[in-house]
């Protein structure tokens, strides 16, 4: 006759059910991180950049000399031209231009958004 012994949970070969939550932790943490809304940050005057433009460090107030109006659109200091009808053009909530580029890299040739002040300011 063969005798079978049951090993209580948490004892034995290290593959007990008590370790399952630890194995799930990385997956749960990743899911929570990915489901969290994108964190936008604020302009120097306190208004919020759109989360579609900024993931926390992409936007910055641009020097006025860095943005020129041309017949084709706004020309940035990098040479990039954003047409006036482009969906990336946003209304600035202050009197300054604000550029949003990957990682806030002022030399990037690709802008996520350009915040443009009203002309009557």
Image (cartoon, helix red, strand yellow):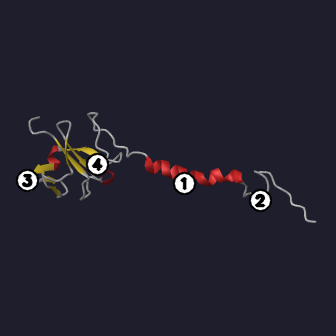
Residue occupying the far front of the picture: 1
Indicate which disc, 3 or 2, sits on the residue closer to the N terminus: 2
Question: What numbered label is drawn on residue 117?
Answer: none
Badge 1 is on which residue?
A: 27
Relative placement, left or right, of 13 versus 43 is right
Callout 2: few (<14), some (14-19), or many (20+) C-alpha neighbours within 10 Å?
A: few
Give the mark toward the camera: 3 or 1: 1
Give the CA distance from mark 3 to mark 2. 72 Å
Q: Which is nearer the eye, 94 or 26? A: 26
Question: What numbered label is drawn on residue 13?
Answer: 2
Task: Name the quadrant containing residue 91.
Answer: top left
Give the CA distance from mark 3 to mark 1. 50 Å
| Picture residue at 24% right of the left edge, 54% below the top | 111
Q: In the picture shown, does residue 46 fall above or below 75? A: above
Question: What numbered label is drawn on residue 53?
Answer: 4
Badge 3 is on which residue?
A: 70
């Amino acid at each position: 006759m063969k005798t079978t012994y049951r090993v209580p949970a948490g004892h034995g070969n290290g593959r007990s059910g008590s370790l399952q939550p630890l194995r799930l932790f990385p997956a749960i943490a990743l899911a929570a991180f990915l489901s969290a809304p994108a964190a936008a940050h604020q302009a120097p005057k306190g208004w919020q950049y759109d989360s579609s433009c900024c993931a926390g460090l992409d936007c910055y107030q641009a020097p006025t000399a860095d943005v020129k109006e041309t017949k084709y659109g706004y020309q940035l200091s990098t040479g990039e031209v954003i047409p006036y009808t482009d969906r990336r053009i946003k209304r600035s909530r202050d009197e300054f231009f604000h550029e949003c580029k990957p990682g806030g890299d002022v030399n990037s040739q690709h802008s996520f958004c350009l915040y443009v002040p009203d002309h009557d300011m």
